Image (cartoon, rainbow, N blue to C red):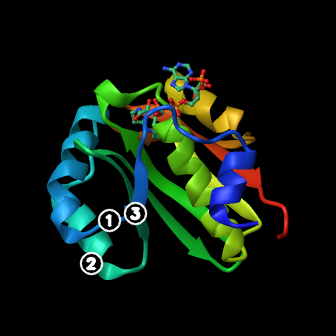
Amino acid sequence: MGGGAWTAAAGLMPTLKVQLRAALADDVDAIHAIEVASFGDPWKRDGFRDLILGGNATVVVAESGSGILGFAVSYAAADEAEIANVAVATFARRGGIGRTLVGHVVAKASRAGARMVFLEVRESNVAARALYTALGFAELARRAAYYNNPREDAVVMRLDVPAQ
Ligand SMILES: CC(C)(COP(=O)(O)OP(=O)(O)OC[C@H]1O[C@@H](n2cnc3c(N)ncnc32)[C@H](O)[C@@H]1OP(=O)(O)O)[C@@H](O)C(=O)NCCC(=O)NCCS
């Protein structure tokens, strides 16, 4: 099944109209602004630039007519993928963009042969944990004091992806 079909079948079409595309170096400022507004321990601007230019990670943006509203960073190797970062602009949340971004990453990883997708999330991050649970991720483990500002445990979550 193609990514678009997977997304539609899983009910992942956003209510806010966005297009997903690979991030470009010119997107770094917009991505970083969302990052800083979203996290107490944000990634550095240059880290995003290096990821976009480096090619080891996949960085996807969700774009509307008014600009970039969200992004996701993921890695894939052999039959595993990892969602390393995802965030949506504060004003655009609860419009289905986060669900669409994560669904896209899972669909793309599945097409590339991933059978498991992993991620880490702050224990207190109710919104993200609800999103991942809604998409079928289950808690696998905890990493004590994994995050800074504030210091907090990480919940490791895993999704098993069926073979295509
Ligand atoms: C987590 C995040 C990416 C979700 O993005 P979003 O576009 O708002 O999410 P969606 O609108 O696609 O929500 C999909 C589902 O997730 C769950 N969800 C999302 N936000 C929620 C919230 N604040 N409270 C409870 N459940 C929530 C719901 O099940 C929701 O479905 P529903 O709207 O039909 O009830 C967004 O809140 C965000 O950017 N947070 C800050 C960054 C962050 O925490 N990233 C994750 C790091 S691990």
For the residue marked with disc 2, what is the amino acid?
Leu
Label 3, on which residue?
21
Q: Are marks 2 and 1 in contact (CB under 8 Å)?
A: no
Q: Residue furthest right?
A: 163
Quadrant the C terminus occupies: bottom right
Badge 1: how crowded within 10 Å, few (<14), some, or many (20+)? many
Taking the spot 40% from the left edge, 63% from the top edge, the residue there is 21
Residue 26 is situated, as x and y percent measured from the top left of the image, at: 16, 65
Kindly check if marks 1 and 3 are in contact, taking CB atoms under 8 A apart as contact: yes
Quickly name the residue at label 1: 23
Left or right: where does residue 122 sit relative to residue 3?
left
Few, some or many C-alpha atoms within 10 Å of disc 3 (few <14, some 14-19, many ≥20)? few
| Res. 53 mark | 2
SS at mark 2? helix
Q: Is residue 130 visible?
A: yes
Q: Amino acid at mark 1?
A: Ala
Res. 149 in view? no
**In this rendering, is residue 59 above or below 11?**
below
